[in-house]
Amino acid sequence: MKIGAENKKELRWMIALLAVALLVGIYNFADFGTSSAAPPATTTSTTSTGATKKGAAAVDPTLDPRLHTETLITSQNIKYQPGRNIFRMEELPPQTPIASVRMGPEAPPTPTPAPTPPPINLKFYGFASKPNEPKKIFLSDDTEVFVAKQGDIVERKYKVAQINNNSVLIEDLLYNNKQMIPLTPR
């Protein structure tokens, strides 16, 4: 029985691909002295007298694992100031003492005035009436002319509330605003 002897070109490609796969496998699984793992942490141990053993690193007194609520309260009261880089550690200005921090309810914020609704940009050009039919009006914005009767909605946001001889009362449904539009002479 022959193995790949019939087609020598395919046999050469197979050997080349196996060699490349073997090299990639060795590269991925071999340790060449470089490692992305972090170095092992140094452990510290203390004797009953509090002295450190020879060869062990001393415990850093600033690394206290306890929760300090006073520090959290002062950091919660820091407000963002424009121009401050929140990604860079900077010296903070001296904080007020913890005892002077007020924990009671704050004064209610001053209400902002409601924004004025935009004006209705329709023009009233006239009306048409036939016997036994409701009165219809002609309204126009900058590009289109609309024919509507009382109660109709124009441009999906304006409702014709009332029709008079010289004016029309239009209600803006989006902003709940009513505006009287006078008859515009041509």
Image (cartoon, rainbow, N blue to C red):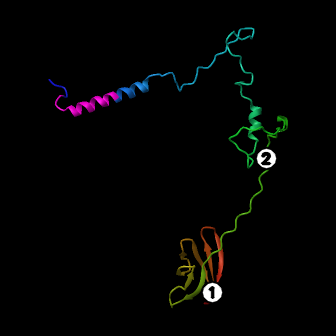
Q: Residue at x 63, y 87 (%)?
A: 184
Q: Is residue 30 above or below residue 125?
A: above
Task: Indicate the position of residue 63 as horizontal and vertical percent values.
Answer: 71, 24
The quarter of the rendered structure image containing the N terminus is top left
* Image spot of residue 58 (x, y percent): 71, 16
Q: Which residue is mark 1?
A: 184
Task: Identify the image quadrant of the C terminus.
Answer: bottom right
* Mark 1 nearby-residue class (10 Å; few <14, some 14–19, many ≥20): few
Q: Secondary structure at mark 1?
A: loop
Left or right, 86 with reference to 33: right
Tag 2 residue: 106
Task: Tell whether 91 sits left or right of 127.
Answer: right
Q: Position of residue 49 (x, y in %)?
A: 75, 8
Q: Specify start and end residues of the magenta stretch as a single range.
A: 5-19
Give coordinates of residue 28: x percent, y percent.
43, 27
Residue at 75% x, 21% y: name it.
61
Q: Which secondary structure type mostly characterizes the magenta part of the structure?
A: helix
Residue type at mark 1: give it.
Answer: Thr
Q: Amino acid at mark 2?
A: Glu
Tell me if residue 12 is in the magenta stretch. Answer: yes
> Residue at point 70% right, 65% down?
115
